[in-house]
Image (cartoon, rainbow, N blue to C red):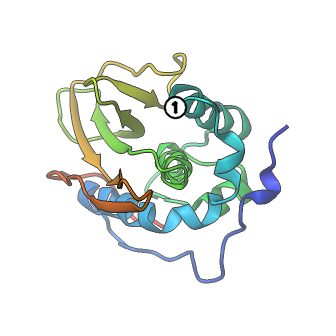
């Protein structure tokens, strides 16, 4: 059913330690850095998930990640942030890699999105990340393929940090322009992210 041969494999030299003793801030910045490089891997594949409307397209992306890539928590003391190519090749990843894969598909389809870094405890330090699509009416489409709930739902968080990525503006000529929507403040996490 899925045309996964269209997902490009990891490139030589893509695996590197960005921060040997990383913090939450380092992990968040590595996810956002990886976001800029990730679209390469899913450029053709993302088109196969496109539906007649945005909500169904988002559901298709969410369902692919949720059902086709097993969730595997990173080993203790390590934080891996995998490219979409690496994630698909290894068929295992956690919320960081799931989010980068999801976002790469949205980016390739011209859909504005953001990363939500969430905490579920009294401590505001994020312990989870997922992707959301902000809508013009102030609502969102939630794409959390780790959460056990249904599509377009999220676990209730105590704190969140939203990081919107590039917005896509369509001009009357049909040309697409991109501009920075916003990057917020960051806190602490754990260790060694890899893209």
Count all numbered tags in the image, as a single digit: 1
Residue 27, quarter of the rendered image: bottom left
Residue drawn where x is 71% and y is 65% of the image: 8
Q: Residue furthest front?
A: 173
Q: Quadrant of the N terminus?
A: top right
Badge 1 element: helix
16 left or right, relative to 71: left
Query: In the rendered image, which quarter is residue 82 located in?
Result: bottom right
Q: Is residue 155 above or below residue 89?
A: above
Compared to 41, does 168 lie above or below? above
According to the image, label 1 marks what residue?
54
Name of the residue lying farthest toward the right: 1
Give the residue drawn at x 77%, y 58%: 6
Q: Residue 100 at what x, y percent from top left?
A: 49, 52
> Is residue 193 visible to us here?
no
- Write the residue at 67% across / 70% down: 10
Query: Foreground residue, 174 or 157?
Result: 174
| Picture coordinates of residue 49, whole percent (x, y) | 67, 40
Residue found at the far left of this picture = 185
At 38% from the left and 20% from the top, the residue drawn is: 155
Which of 161 and 141 lies nearest the eye of the viewer?
141
Q: Residues within 10 Å of mark 1 (few under 14, many from 20)?
A: some
Give the image quarter of residue 11.
Answer: bottom right
Residue 141 position, x and y percent, is 42, 27
Q: Say which of 131 and 168 sits in front.
A: 168
In this rendering, position of residue 44 left or right of residue 175: right
Residue 164 makes an appearance in the image: yes
Residue 58 x, y percent position in the rendering: 54, 33
Camera-nearest residue between 114 and 92: 114
Give the left or right position of residue 191, taking residue 104 as reference.
left
């Amino acid at each position: 059913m899925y045309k996964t041969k269209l997902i490009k494999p990891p490139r030589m030299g893509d695996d590197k330690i960005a921060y040997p003793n990383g913090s939450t801030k380092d992990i968040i910045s590595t996810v956002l850095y990886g976001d800029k490089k990730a679209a390469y891997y899913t450029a053709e594949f993302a088109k196969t998930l496109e539906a007649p409307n945005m909500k169904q397209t988002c559901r298709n992306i969410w369902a692919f990640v949720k059902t086709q890539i097993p969730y595997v928590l990173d080993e203790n003391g390590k934080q891996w942030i995998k490219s979409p190519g690496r994630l698909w090749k290894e068929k295992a990843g956690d919320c960081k890699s799931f989010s980068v894969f999801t976002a790469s598909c949205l980016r390739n389809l011209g859909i504005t999105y953001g990363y939500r870094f969430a905490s579920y405890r009294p401590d505001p330090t994020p312990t989870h990340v997922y992707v959301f699509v902000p809508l013009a009416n102030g609502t969102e489409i939630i794409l959390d393929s780790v959460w056990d709930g249904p599509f377009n739902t999220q676990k209730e968080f105590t704190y969140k940090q939203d990081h919107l990525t590039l917005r896509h503006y369509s001009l009357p000529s049909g040309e697409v322009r991109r501009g920075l929507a916003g990057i917020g403040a960051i806190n602490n996490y754990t260790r060694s992210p890899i893209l």
